[in-house]
Amino acid sequence: MKTYPALATCGSGQYFIGISEKATLHYCIRPMRAEDIPQVMEIEREAFPDQWPPPSYRGELKNQLARYFVLIETDMAPEERAAPSPASRGNNRPHSGIGDLFSRALSLFSPKSPETTGEPGGKPRIVGAAGFWLMVDEAHVTTIAIRGTHRRKGLGELLLVHAIDLAIELNAQVVTLEVRVTNTVAQDLYHKYGFNKVGVRKGYYTDNGEDAFIMTTDRTSSGVFKTRFQALKQALSVKLHQDISLASKCEV
Ligand SMILES: CC(C)(COP(=O)(O)OP(=O)(O)OC[C@H]1O[C@@H](n2cnc3c(N)ncnc32)[C@H](O)[C@@H]1OP(=O)(O)O)[C@@H](O)C(=O)NCCC(=O)NCCS
């Protein structure tokens, strides 16, 4: 992954374990927009210093075959974002039960009331980005990266899950990618999600001539793949303290 020749490479249930400031941090995913590019470039520069500059995201965002998306850190659960704000409900309205009490309790611990833990200028804080090209019945992951400060929390997984879900929605039968032979961290992530090494591209990376492993999933429609994927998604929801099936309900 991450070389750019002709073809790019590379429920409503609650799982809160307790109310704490940490539990108020949530993540959502939405399609990448032009205004996200500066933050995405920061993430890319940190993640792939040897392959700077990255592809032209302005061009990629216009590419009909490509799907790019960003992971945003927010300070509200998707359930809360979907609900009317206390102001719009009116101050006199009686509280409507546990859910209301829960969100009021959360707000006490929220660092601030706006919807995101934002960047200056009110921009949402992007903590990761990923994308793939859809080629016939194959989704080819071109990039996936998480800010250094946010690694090892399950967020790379969250992006990969979103990529696979979207690929399935778009009728991709397999998901595939290239990864440096030395990038064992990324290989472990892919392996966890059922990618297998199916070949080697010799001298694939132009910066140092490193080989790439080609890693590919089984058919996404196979029972084995589906069962494993569902189990991993459930485990990730628990780990992230949020229902990850709601992660794409991003309103920022
Ligand atoms: C690869 C990358 C996206 C993983 O993101 P992350 O948010 O840190 O990873 P997660 O916390 O979601 O970990 C998911 C799995 O990845 C693997 N993994 C992640 N970090 C690891 C590490 N430091 N050592 C070993 N395995 C690791 C594990 O299998 C892990 O599952 P586990 O928690 O059950 O052990 C991130 O390290 C990154 O941005 N790296 C730089 C860019 C890059 O190399 N991208 C891939 C290009 S092909």
Image (tube, helix red, strand yellow):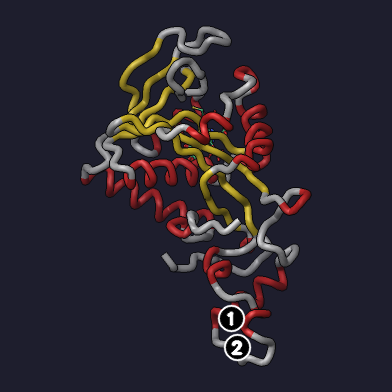
Q: Is residue 194 above or below residue 72?
A: above
Tell which residue pokes out farthest to the right in this image. Answer: 120
Q: Quadrant of residue 25?
A: bottom right
Front-most of 94 and 236? 94
> Mark 2 or 1 closer to N-term?
2
Report if residue 46 is visible in the image: yes
- Looking at the rendered structure, the kind of residue marked 1 is Asp
**Which numbered circle lies on residue 95?**
2
Q: As drawn, is 188 to the left or to the right of 223? A: right
Tell which residue pokes out farthest to the left in this image. Answer: 223
Q: Horizontal and vertical percent for residue 181?
A: 46, 17
| Residue drawn where x is 61% and y is 40% of the image | 34
Front-most of 139 and 160? 139
Front-most of 168 and 47? 168
Q: Do the CB atoms of the residues marked 2 and 1 lie less than 8 Å apart?
A: yes
Q: How many marks?
A: 2
Q: Horizontal and vertical percent for residue 32?
A: 55, 42
- Tell me if the residue at label 1 has its CB under 8 Å from ligand 1: no
Distance, label 2 to label 1, CA atoms, is: 6 Å
Q: Dot 2, how many residues are within 10 Å of its Cα: few (below 14), some (14-19), or many (20+)?
A: few
| Residue drawn where x is 59% and y is 68% of the image | 18
Report if residue 217 is visible in the image: no
Helix or strand or loop: what does disc 1 sit on? helix
Q: Is residue 85 above or below residue 91?
A: above
| Residue drawn where x is 41% and y is 8% of the image | 202
Q: Quadrant of residue 171?
A: top left
In the rendered image, which residue does mark 1 sit on?
100
- Looking at the rendered structure, the kind of residue marked 2 is His
